[in-house]
Amino acid sequence: MKQKYTYSSALTIAGFDGSGGAGIQADIKTFSALGCYATSVLTALPVQNTQGVRSIYPIPYQAVAEQIEAIMDDIPPRAIKIGMVHTAELVHTIVATLQQYPAVPLVFDPVMVATSGHKLIEDATIQAIIEQLFPIASVITPNMDEAAILANMPIKTLDDMYLAGEKIMALGCKSVLLKGGHLDLPVITSLFFDGQGNINPFEFEKFATNNTHGSGCTLSSAIAAYLAQGNGLSEAVKLGQTYVHKAIRHGANVAIGKGNGPLNHFFNPQKLIKNEMV
């Protein structure tokens, strides 16, 4: 029987989380919950749980390149999410490998600091990320800790967020979504610098919960999923944030692990979205 349909596919290039709340596991859950076919490339093997990261074991760079090639040659994604890249050579490997293929929308989550506060990235890697990954990413999604590193300034207020966003945009980004969940504000506020001179604020209700492990991974992969389904970037950013806020709310009172628990990625799972083959 002749195949007539395919699924909207999304690729995550990210690190491992055996506790299931962050990293490549959170990305696969998010893609699946939003109706995308999930593919993945492993970049690192952190040993972690909800209480924090214990150690990080590297994946050989050649293995990362071969993983990317295997997926891109067989199941070309409609969007890509990149998460944990902890060395400059890994940045170069990913960028050089992706350059062999037609460009697709790319969401980069500059994972530098875990929810637990554990620093995950080598200092020498930051410049490589700025020079090589920022120019090819459709949007980057730093949280306040990561934005403070990139902007080289403390971020304590909403005014600080605006200034930091402008500084990060000046590093060569196409667009930036600054996530303000870590700030002491009455509502959760984020700012989207769309690259066209516009700064779009988003506000969400704040509520008490420790279950935010993997929220940054989930947001970047949600944006990628919505891009894979054909949404424009601004709409994907809006929809992605709404999904994450609901996933946190639906998992707020669930006890999984002894530390920062995960989101409820499957609070409203969608069927795989079919696309007619040309």
Image (cartoon, rainbow, N blue to C red):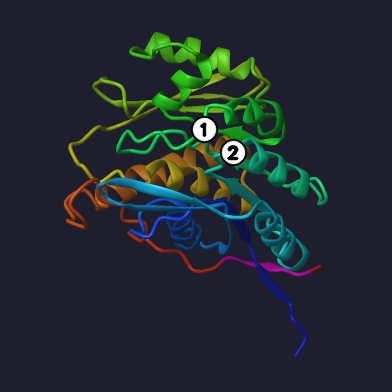
- Relative side of 49 to 175, left or right: left
Tags 1 and 2 touching, CB below 8 Å: yes
- Relative side of 251 to 105, left or right: left
Residue sitting nearer the eye, 141 or 205? 141
- Type of the residue with mark 2: Thr
At a point 19% along the width and 41% down the height, the residue shown is 209
Residue 48 is marked as: none
Q: Is residue 158 magenta?
A: no
Quadrant where the C terminus is found in the figure: bottom right
- Relative side of 111 to 278, left or right: left
Mark 1, residues whose alpha carbon is within 10 Å: few (<14), some, or many (≥20)? Answer: few
- Type of the residue with mark 1: Glu
Magenta segment:
273-277
At a point 31% along the width and 27% down the height, the residue shown is 182
Residue sitting nearer the eye, 210 or 268? 210
Residue 122 is marked as: 1
